[in-house]
Image (cartoon, coloured by chain):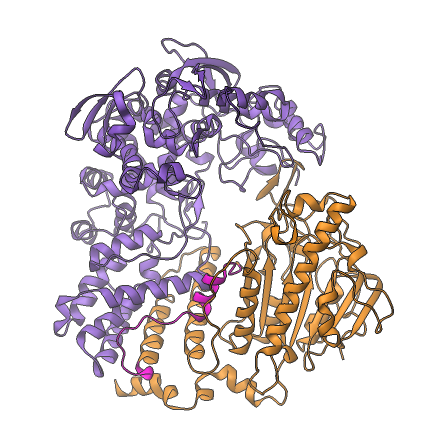
Chain colours: A orange, B purple
Amino acid sequence: MTTRRRLLTGGAAASALALFPWLEQRAKAAALPPRLLLYYTPHGTIWDQFRCAGGETGFTFSPILTSLEKHRDKVVIVDGLKMDNGTDYYIPHTYTMPVVWTGSPIDTDSSTFCRDDHMQCFGWGTGTSVDQTIAQRLAPTTPYPTIELGYQCGNLHPAKRMIYTSPGNTKNPLDDPAAAFKTLFGGDVDLGDAAAARAELRRKSVLDTALADFASHRAKLSTTDQSRLDTHADSIRSLEKSLMGSSAVCTKPTAPTDITAETAIDRQSDLIAGIFGCGLTRIASFQLRIADNDNSLYPWVGLDEGGHHTLSHENDSATFATLAKLYTWYTERFVYLLDRLAATPDVDGTSVLDNTLIIWTSELGTGWTHSLDNVPFILAGGANSGLRGGRYLKVTNALTNRVLVTALEAMGITDVEKYGTTDTGSGGLTGVLT
Amino acid sequence: MRRGPSASTTPLRAAVVALAVAGCTGTITDNTMPGAESGVGGSGTAAGPAKGGGSGTGAQNSGNGGSGGGSASGDGGNAAGGGTTGGSAGSGAAAGTGTNTCTSTASPGAPVPLRRLTATQVERTIADVLGVTQKLDVEDERIGTYRSNISASVDAASARGYYDFAGAVAKAAKLSECASDCSAWLLDEIGLRLFRRPLLDAERTRYGALYELAVEDGTTTEAAAWVVEAMLQSPSFLYTDEVVKADGTLDDYALAGRLSLLLWGRNPDATLLAHAKNGELSTPAELEAEVTRLLSDPESEEGIREFVDQWLDLARLDDPDTRPDVAELGAATVQALRDEPVQYFRRLLGNGAALSELLTSSTSVTSSDLTKLYGDDILKTSGTTVELDPQHRAGILSLPGVTAALSHARRTSPTLRGKAVLTGLLCTPPEPPPANVNTTLPEVSTGVSTRERLEAHMSSSACRGCHAPMDGIGFSLEKLDWLGRTRTDDNGVTIDDSSTFPLGDDEVTVKGAVELGTLLASSPEVAACVSRQWLRYSLGVTETHDADCLVNELATDAQGSEGLEQMMVKALTSDWFRRGPGATP
């Protein structure tokens, strides 16, 4: 048993870097590899109050975006990107949620889901979201290849999921801050193991023993069932790595308290900062609620009846004013996120924001017309994110797919010209990256 | 894909079945009529893609040839199968009871996906094997109304849930055998009980090595905790149906596991494992004997509880946010409300009842916590068995727990009650309300009864199609209030619980809960549907058309003497139940 034991405990005696290979890789690299965060809020915006006046660089921040000014040199606001839903018929919200990060249409040959009011049936999205493609290409050594967070994302439905590991296969976001914290940063059950090294040994040996059982004799399983078991095993592996890493290397975020609808987004932003700061992943996403239909109330901005989606179908000035207040509040939440990333130190002494590209968008451009002609995009990131910030970018004749290619490029994947099956253009968004 | 209104995951029989019920006349039928499919299947259907919910629904009803029953759908909420192929091969055929087009009671093969234990099954097994009470914080999927983990993968949050559970159980387990070396006991006994089969050689080596590693610098108790912690996270513990024989059926150990988890709500006991070891579950007679043994054992209470509780959605009683009125009764009464339908069902099962008695019996098994709610309705008490006033109470639907669960806070919901009958007893669930339809009812005001408020449903064609049968059924239960108490007036209005409503092509009239029970009790459709519910719960999946022959046989059995038990046993000895997961041949 001595040999086996040495094998299992060898790492614990060595330096933290030797134990956590993903940190070792990061420390070795001349510049830290960039990170990516995809950020979603539902139902577009009010363009009249979102659009900034002025030129590409000397622009004035609009009412909705005014709080973003403090990060002026770290953001690019894109005006004019068109989404192609890729299908003949268009059920607003539902048919574009799968398109947001995949650039590929929803499956209209399937009848897994039906909408009787539209007399239409449909299935899941037919693409892979860009974050998952990046994770699959880069094969990150972080504990989690990607992490999905959200808030109130609802049950399994194409209008309620945006991250696809492959056509038809979505990932569930951790959409409750308390559960997310427990999953990603939860402490260990104290089994009375005296020393940290022994607790480490126990965790690793116990989980490795359970993992080995996945290779047992279930030869006759269908491919679906086999992939369920594979995903289960992957989840244990991620858990194992994260448990080893989070104890020693970084300042863990504190457990979120007082979670309400008004504070939950910020609490998830705290976790995102912690996730990146602790190196749990390089690629993450955040989904606020659902595309079809977010009828939540936001009484603290005056949206106290009707619900977000219902109001987004109205076109009177009072409703526009209420919605503009909501979207202003969304911007403030986004700014809070940037603040937290800026305040979180990275392993090389820079801030997490310096090394992260964040892309914020929605499932359509304008709620009350369901228009896809101008879907709002805000890109943000610091010095090492590759973003040429401080600009308001007006574009014409470009699809949202361009931003997806930009995401690939920022993450070092430069051999992709088109992304998604709706893509009729080529390359990343011009002039966005350095 | 454009959807025909009959697109459905549920095979629906279209035969019109005549009912001969004393005191009421009429027929009962499935909503899906022969020819419904052809009426709307083509692309030229009436309204085409419609934004307004009203016109979309209108198009469907006209497509149904004015059958008035609305359209039928699968009851999986979002799920709706059918479509082009399902439409022509499946629900398009006029396959009804009696003229069924099915050819065999056997499964066409491999219909069952790999199942992961439910949280309750895990918790009960741990309590039994390790003597530890610990809550597992991993959510279950629901297939229709039943919890069944057949499709979702274990994601990061669930893996964390199992990890925390395993750690907590390993810490709490008092393994007296492990005061000294207990590795053999762990591998032979605990391993067998957790994995529902003996450990494989590779597993013995692996878990043995884990024990040795732990004991090198620790105690035997600590080593045992490591082993238990690992076993509880192993797929061999968490997933069932492990070994499938060449013919696609489960081996004896896997079958024992499935039976015990279903009927006892936990892993097999030593006796059942011994039967599996000796190959004593292989013949139909042996299997039937074992199923009967498990079902007649008091341990089956927990299995029956899971079925009845989920079938009738009694968990609705345990949500203080939506039901503060129920919560105010106190935990013991809430539990008693939830328990009674289970004990009622078990009593009939044990007494060799026919299925119809489920809908007519006025004898119940209750707790003194419900005495106050029952008031004068209890005529005679003998231990926990009570004779209820047959004028007010007959059948499982009239029990306080059931009517209370199918209510809102401090008001009844005829709609919920009718929907539950259509869904759980007739297997013809109504469609969800069309989007963009205002579902707000008129405000509650003095002197207006619930029934009068619901008349709003009848004023709109978009609502009437589904609400006429739903609300109509519910009106007959109006003399049972939101806590299941009998009442004679509602908001100052004397209750009229006679109700005439469309069921399929016909109109039926019933007066009160007792007549409704009588009507349903005599319906072969109800017998078939309850059989379907049991089959769904047992298999953990929604059955396909291929099960029609089996369902017909089960329904026939169910209507005979000792029908309830015979139906349940036959389902579990059927080819369908013995099938394992696996690649489609």
Q: Position of residue B53 (x, y in %)?
A: 66, 33
A217 and B57: which is toward the camera: B57
Q: Position of residue B95 (x, y in %)?
A: 49, 25
Give the magenta-colored segment's residue range. Answer: A173-198
A383 and A331: which is toward the camera: A331
Above or below residue B526? Residue A309 is below
Decide whether residue A193 is among the magenta residues.
yes
The residue lying at 40 percent from left, 21 percent from top is: B477
Question: In which quadrant is the N terminus of chain A drawn?
Answer: bottom left
Quadrant in which residue B145 is drawn: top left
Above or below residue A197? Residue A270 is above
The residue lying at 54 percent from left, 30 percent from top is: B72
Q: In the image, A342: left or right of B489?
A: right
Decide whether residue A75 is among the magenta residues.
no
B163 and A221: which is toward the camera: B163
Q: Position of residue A26 (x, y in %)?
A: 56, 85
B582 and A37: which is toward the camera: A37
Quadrant in which residue B525 is drawn: top left
Above or below residue A226? Residue B31 is above
The residue lying at 55 percent from left, 60 percent from top is: A263
Q: In the image, A332: left or right of B30?
A: right
Q: In the image, B70: left or right of A58?
A: left
Q: Position of residue A194 (x, y in %)?
A: 27, 81
